[in-house]
Amino acid sequence: MKKLFFICLCIPFAVKAQFKIVNTATIDLLNLRSTTWPINLQRVTKESDTCYVLVFRSQEYINEVIMKTLRFPNLEQLKYFQKGLSTLKTGSTGDVAEFKDYTIKRIDKKKEGSWYTLVFDGGLTNFQQPEADKMIAVISSL
């Protein structure tokens, strides 16, 4: 009887120790495209830590849906991404902004204007100048 009482008394504490509630919030800052090739900029807050992520579908594989998440550990790193886009905006075709984990390349097309190619972790996505301008504006306001 004493053993049963002791087990009933200890089980709630053992079970409670296995579950930890973590306050996590994900906020969409910018939804550039929600079509077949989505690009989303999000802020992720976990307890007191805030990071930013750019989520996109890799355009490398047409028949497969492979989502890539480019993580910026803090606002400073996200601002570097913005500076890369701003610098390429004033550049010319073939200019490349290389960072530790990703690269952005500018490609000019006569009829379509400027395009940017973001390459990260084996995945890539393309976006046009108006989409880059929206990202620059949103990141500047942070």
Image: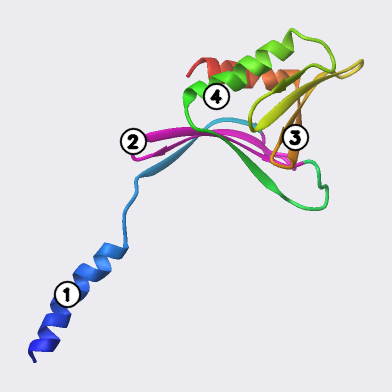
Dot 3 or dot 2: first in sequence order is 2
How crowded is the residue under tag 3: few (<14 C-alpha within 10 Å), some, or many (20+)? some
Secondary structure, mark 1, is helix
Judge from the rendering whether residue 43 lies leftward or rightward of residue 70; answer left or right: left
Q: Is residue 5 magenta?
A: no
Q: Tell me the amino acid under the disc marked 2.
A: Ser
Q: Tell me the amino acid under the disc marked 4.
A: Leu
Q: Is residue 135 above or below residue 55?
A: above
Which residue is drawn at the image coordinates 33% and 35% (left, top)? 48
Over which residues does the magenta segment extend? 33-58
CA–CA distance in space, label 1 to label 2: 32 Å
Secondary structure, mark 2, is loop
In which image quadrant can residue 71 be found? top right
Residue 24 in the image, given as x and y percentages of width and height? 39, 44
Judge from the rendering whether residue 46 lies leftward or rightward of residue 125; answer left or right: left
Residues marked 4 and 3 touching at CB (< 8 Å): no
Residue that numbered label 4 is attached to: 78
Dot 2 or dot 4: first in sequence order is 2
Residue that numbered label 1 is attached to: 10
Give the label, 3 or 1, closer to the camera: 1
Residue that numbered label 3 is attached to: 125
Residue 112 in the image, given as x and y percentages of width and height? 87, 19
Which residue is drawn at the image coordinates 34% and 45% (left, top)? 23
Quarter in which the N terminus is drawn = bottom left
Dot 1 or dot 4: first in sequence order is 1
Secondary structure, mark 3, is strand
CA–CA distance in space, label 3 to label 1: 53 Å
Q: Is residue 94 above or below residue 32?
A: above
Which residue is drawn at the image coordinates 77% and 23% (left, top)? 105
- Looking at the picture, tell me which residue is in the foreground, 120 or 68: 120
Q: Tell me the amino acid under the disc marked 3.
A: Thr
